[in-house]
Amino acid sequence: MDNDRHRDAHHLDKIRSWPEHDHLGLMEYVEVLWRSGEWGWKQQRNPFTGRVVSRTYQVSTGGVPGNEAIVGALEANRFFWEQCMVSYHHRGLYEFKVTITASRS
């Protein structure tokens, strides 16, 4: 149990301190950690390459404590939050918009 908490704390610290100019990398990292992502994570992907083609992410925490903690860590990353947070809707639905640079597309 302590190992799980330590691992989770490590991931949350990494999100909080993610480099300022790699928002796409941050969202890719968060997607791997997101619990129940099959229904709580929506983004448009190219069906052939699997690459993200939309800069808009609609994520729902689903009330899952781990997802709530991730959103809290994203909010603590002030540069990301101020640049990418678009909206919050009732019941934990967040919308983020990430600029995808030519080198990452």
Image (spheres, rainbow, N blue to C red):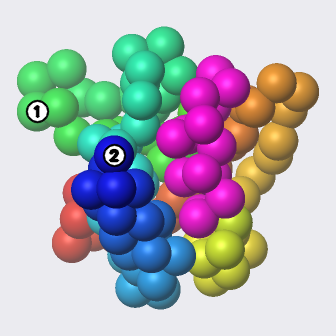
Instruction: Give the distance between the C-alpha atoms of the residues marked 1 and 2, in whole angstroms.
Output: 38 Å
Identity, as a three-letter code, of the amino acid under mark 2: Met
Q: Position of residue 104 (x, y in %)?
A: 23, 65
Residue 26 higher or lower than 44, as above or below:
below
* Residue at image point 40% right, 85% down: 19
- Estimate the x, y position of residue 3 in percent, counting from the top left: 27, 56
Would residue 23 appear left or right of 105 to someone viewing this image? right
Q: What residue occupies the far left of the structure in this picture? A: 49
Which amino acid does the dot numbered 1 rest on? Thr
Q: Is residue 59 magenta?
A: no
Res 45 quadrant in image:
top left
Of the pair 83 and 92, the residue shown nearer to us: 92
Q: For numbered disc 2, what is the local secondary structure?
A: loop
Above/below status of 88 relative to 4: above
Q: Which residue is mark 1?
A: 49
User: Which quarter of the picture shows residue 27?
Assistant: bottom left
Tell me: 6 left or right of 56. Answer: left
Numbered range of the magenta stretch: 61-74
Q: Residue at x 82, y 41 (%)?
A: 88
- Farthest residue to the front: give it: 1
Q: Label 1, secondary structure: give it.
A: loop
Q: Quadrant of residue 31?
A: top left
**Is the residue under label 2 in contact with that under label 1 (CB below 8 Å)?**
no
- Please say if 92 is above or below 82: above
Q: Residues within 10 Å of mark 1 (few under 14, many from 20)?
A: few
Earlier in the chain: of badge 1 and badge 2, it is 2
Above or below — where is 91 with respect to 59? above
In the picture of the structure, the residue carrying the numbered disc 2 is: 1
Left or right relative to 18: residue 28: left
